[in-house]
Image (cartoon, rainbow, N blue to C red):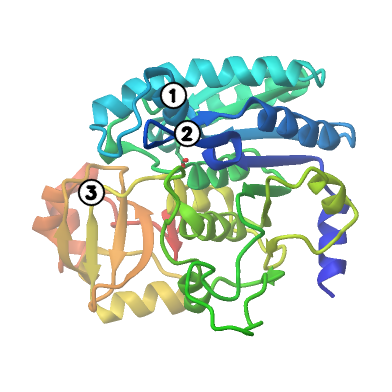
Amino acid sequence: MHKDVRKEILKGLKRIVIKVGSSIITKREKRNNEWANELNANNVRLLARIIRQFVDRNCEVVLVSSGAIMAGRERLDLHRTDLSIPEKQACAAIGQSYLMHTYEKKFKKEGIKVAQILLGHDDLRNRKRFLNAKHTLEALLEHKVIPIINENDSVTIDEIKIGDNDTLSATVACLLNAQLLIILSDVDGLFSRDPSSKMREGDTSMKIIEHVDCITQKIEKLAGGSKSKVTVGGMHTKILAAKQTMSFGIPTLIVNGFDKSIAEKIYKGKSVGTLFWGGREKIKKRKHWIAHTLKPSGAITIDSGAEKAILSRGKSLLPAGVIKVEGKFEFGNAVRILGENGKEIARGLVNYNFRDLDSIMGMRTTAVKKIFKDNFYNEVIHRDDLTLL
Ligand code: GLU
């Protein structure tokens, strides 16, 4: 059954996003009693070969690559673990051009042209910039150029960072309506047990989970935290990335990026890695953008009546249902909507700023109308601007 699912996905494969982590394109060596990572040009070449195989099957490929900070560290011979944020940003600035130079050289050997795109959260949460990025990427693909995307680390500070490239790759897959996100990892997929946990002798219970059709708490637990010294996210952020693409109707496949014949195995429909795929139901693009791309600027707690109206009756959020306002959001910002128990139930774009909402919360619509006259909105968040989580 799982094989059929994989074959079905392959049938429509026209555009894929491949995410490669630093650990795939890095060599780890001990120098002067200190562990040092350096860019592994041979692995970049291997990656070029893998990508060539997708391109040869008429598939457009967008690459999301980490490695800038690691490559910058190598250039500066700076391998201590306690780098400050400006130091990391300096490393990213140095390493990004070195990384791209290596990509340029190695991909050229496979006849592939590359282009660099650096994105930040601001580029994705503003609808206009989001569309600009999309158009540029589409134009590159049309000219048979492989866009290589990384987060714009050298100019974004931690609070406004996307954070990790797993999340970035999921956002890019959704932005471009790709049919598949492939995460090339340094492990074979998601294990049925945390592989770093101690195993008793003779225990054969640990195996790769072939297919996840719904990301449950149990699956999230299996992902654990980040253990690698080189990469940022570990399996946890990969699961979050898969969750994001699945909610947009895009499958995510986590496979071992050191496997030379991975493209072939994928095309043969072999059960490699872990496939995250729940079916074809898509949520509307705009709703996805609200829920996953925008960074919430605040939170609104609502009473149980409003919660019911939103969750079960598909209603908008009205001022009467609001019981608490947190954060300094302005008109049009994304906010989190919390139930009385503090649990997030939805996200939406708000029609009132935090000051106004604070003064009208709990009020009936007629009373609000009297205060705001021409600037009056019936809804705090209209249904169309609301995404249930
Ligand atoms: N953008 C970072 C870099 O290029 C890596 C982030 C990640 O690995 O998720 O070094």
Q: Residues within 10 Å of mark 1 (few under 14, many from 20)?
A: some
**What number is the disc on residue 74?**
1
Callout 1 amino acid: Glu
Q: Residues within 10 Å of mark 2 (few under 14, many from 20)?
A: many
Q: Depth-wise, is mark 3 or mark 2 nearer the camera?
A: 2
- Which of the 4 image quadrants contains residue 360? bottom left
Where is residue 30 drawn, in percent x and y?
A: 45, 36
Label 3 residue SS: loop
Residue marked by disc 2: 37
Q: Residues within 10 Å of mark 3 (few under 14, many from 20)?
A: many
Please give left or right for residue 198 compared with residue 212 in the image: left
Residue marked by disc 3: 352
For residue 258, above or below residue 131: below
* Mark 1 touches mark 2? (CB < 8 Å): yes
Q: Earlier in the sequence, mark 1 or mark 2?
A: 2
| Between 149 and 285, the one nearer to me in the picture | 149
For residue 266, above or below residue 19: below
Please give left or right for residue 301 compared with residue 90 in the image: left
Please give left or right for residue 332 compared with residue 289 in the image: left
Q: Earlier in the sequence, mark 1 or mark 3?
A: 1
Callout 3 amino acid: Tyr
Label 1 residue SS: helix
**Which quarter shows the N terminus?**
bottom right
| Between 288 and 367, the one nearer to me in the picture | 288
